[in-house]
């Protein structure tokens, strides 16, 4: 009777876990909104880019930007709008991951552990709480793909192929390296004689058609902007030690191995703690589903290794492997399921320390805004953008009709404070300003330089103003240095600005 009661308890816990995950992400949004109005790098970029809709925005695919644009157009620009979008996608990632696990894992508690395993991944519980955007969309796409893919293998239908195609399309316009996931999935299934027919089923045309329709607009942009789309990431991957091809290959391989270990060790620890006496049995267990999931992980990592060696890359970041490491929890649970291990009571032992850890990390990451000043350092959340914008606009009856600044983070933070004012960079638009660009009202130009209370006027901004017909003698910089948010009064952050009065036709 006690065993039956324990199983009922596990079933109840399993049913409520999705609500616990939802509550966690709501908490993430609430804490982020209240700790500081300053934006991190990705947040600032999204705040800036959300003012226009485009087929491409640079080196990152546009899906996250399109979603952010839709949210801002619907609800207006706010820190809540920026933060909620990210965490809704993370929740959907967990939701579809759990649904995918239920398709291939018989034990309900174990399928729930697979879903919770997503929260053990550093890109989800740590990096996303600091600054992450496009990878979040790609993680959601991987989970949706797993749901559609497993459903297609288990019980194929037009719907399952449709979902799989939608997931592939979303993934490809979320992160370019997502392409490795469906390719690895197809190759992983081919050795399974009874399942390979799913790959050659006529309904796969539905998947290809819907994926192609989703990808086509951005593919057209890539065709005309290939260098812009790829150069930045390739440059980052090549950062590291110079030297010959052998040295680069060794450094790149070591960097890849280190990133994989760093991203996969925590899920391993959690499952090892919950199943401490079954590790040998789990390692030996095998099923058709463990073979498929295992091949997917190996093929993805092998593809990344080939890219590393081909490009001479030496710097592989953990977040770049997130789309492949997210397969890790479900693979571990498939191994446990194949071993036939009794899981009664284990879900609770998995969930409680997990939520303690992720909430502690959330509090620790959020507390940076308070603890950094105590340690004599400041981070991006302490930069007083709101105080700066408020100070230079409070005595003006007319708000700026246009704001020009030099980088996306400053542009996004300024736009958050002045949501009705268009913001441009020196390279946006790339053509000279129109002759009547100052006719709508005064123009505000702002800039900064970390560490300087009176930052020099950037040449890029000067060149942009000269293009618009502003004479050199009319450029009269002003400076202000408000105190850091929650910082010491003596510690100040310097900004430069100038106002260009309205010119009437």
Image (tube, rainbow, N blue to C red):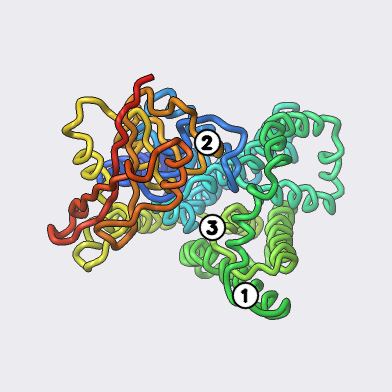
Tell me the CA gap for discs 3 and 2: 38 Å
Judge from the rendering whether residue 266 lies leftward or rightward of residue 404; answer left or right.
right
Residue 255 appears in the rendering = yes
The residue to which callout 2 is attached is 432
Q: Residue at x 57, y 40 (%)?
A: 57
Q: Position of residue 277 (x, y in %)?
A: 52, 70
The residue to which callout 3 is attached is 319
Tell me the CA gap for discs 3 and 1: 16 Å
Q: Is residue 488 above or below residue 461?
A: below
Image quadrant where residue 412 sits: top left
Q: Secondary structure at mark 3?
A: helix
Residue 9 appears in the rendering = no
Q: Position of residue 465 (x, y in %)?
A: 42, 41
Q: Residue at x 35, y 52 (%)?
A: 457
Q: Residue at x 52, y 67 (%)?
A: 262
Q: Secondary structure at mark 1?
A: helix
Q: Residues within 10 Å of mark 1 (few under 14, many from 20)?
A: some
């Amino acid at each position: 009777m006690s065993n039956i009661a324990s199983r009922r308890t596990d079933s109840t816990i399993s049913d409520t876990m999705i609500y616990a995950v939802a509550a966690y992400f709501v908490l993430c949004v609430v804490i982020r909104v209240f700790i500081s109005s300053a934006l991190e790098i990705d947040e600032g970029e999204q705040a800036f880019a959300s003012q226009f809709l485009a087929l491409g925005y640079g080196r990152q695919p546009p899906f996250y930007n399109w979603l952010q644009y839709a949210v801002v157009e619907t609800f207006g620009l706010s820190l809540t709008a920026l933060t909620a979008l990210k965490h809704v996608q993370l929740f959907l990632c967990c939701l579809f991951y759990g649904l995918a696990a239920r398709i291939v894992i018989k034990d309900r508690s174990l399928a729930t552990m697979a879903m919770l395993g997503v929260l053990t991944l550093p890109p989800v519980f740590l990096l996303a709480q600091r600054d992450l955007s496009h990878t979040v969309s790609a993680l959601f796409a991987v989970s949706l793909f797993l749901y559609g893919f497993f459903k297609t293998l288990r019980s194929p239908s037009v719907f399952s192929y449709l979902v799989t195609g939608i997931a592939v399309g979303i993934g490809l316009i979320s992160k370019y390296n997502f392409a490795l996931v469906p390719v690895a999935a197809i190759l992983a299934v081919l050795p399974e004689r009874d399942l390979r027919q799913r790959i050659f089923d006529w309904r796969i045309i539905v998947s290809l058609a819907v994926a192609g329709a989703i990808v086509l607009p951005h593919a057209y942009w890539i065709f005309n902007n290939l260098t812009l789309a790829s150069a930045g990431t390739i440059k980052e991957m090549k950062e590291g030690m110079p030297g010959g091809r052998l040295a680069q290959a060794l450094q790149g391989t070591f960097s890849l191995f280190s990133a994989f270990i760093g991203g996969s060790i925590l899920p391993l620890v959690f499952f090892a703690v919950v199943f401490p006496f079954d590790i040998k049995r789990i390692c030996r267990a095998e099923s058709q589903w463990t073979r498929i999931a295992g091949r997917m992980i190996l093929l993805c990592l092998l593809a990344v290794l080939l890219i590393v060696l081909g490009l001479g890359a030496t710097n592989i970041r953990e977040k770049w492997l997130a789309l492949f490491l997210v397969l890790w929890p479900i693979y571990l649970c498939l191994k446990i399921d194949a071993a036939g291990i009794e899981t009664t009571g284990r879900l609770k032992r998995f969930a409680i320390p997990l939520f303690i850890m992720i909430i502690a990390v959330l509090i620790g990451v959020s507390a940076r805004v308070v603890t950094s000043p105590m340690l004599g350092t400041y981070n991006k959340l302490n930069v007083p953008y709101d105080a700066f914008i408020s100070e230079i606009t409070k005595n003006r009856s007319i708000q700026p009709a246009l704001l020009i600044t030099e980088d996306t983070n400053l542009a996004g933070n300024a736009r958050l404070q002045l949501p009705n004012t268009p913001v441009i960079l020196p390279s946006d638009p790339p053509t000279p300003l129109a002759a009547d660009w100052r006719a709508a009202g005064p123009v505000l130009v702002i800039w900064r330089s970390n560490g300087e209370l009176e930052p020099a006027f950037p040449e890029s901004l000067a060149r942009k103003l000269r293009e618009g017909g502003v004479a050199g003698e009319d450029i009269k910089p002003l400076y202000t240095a408000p105190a850091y948010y929650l910082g010491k009064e003596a510690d100040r952050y310097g900004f430069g600005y100038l106002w260009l009065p309205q010119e009437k036709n």
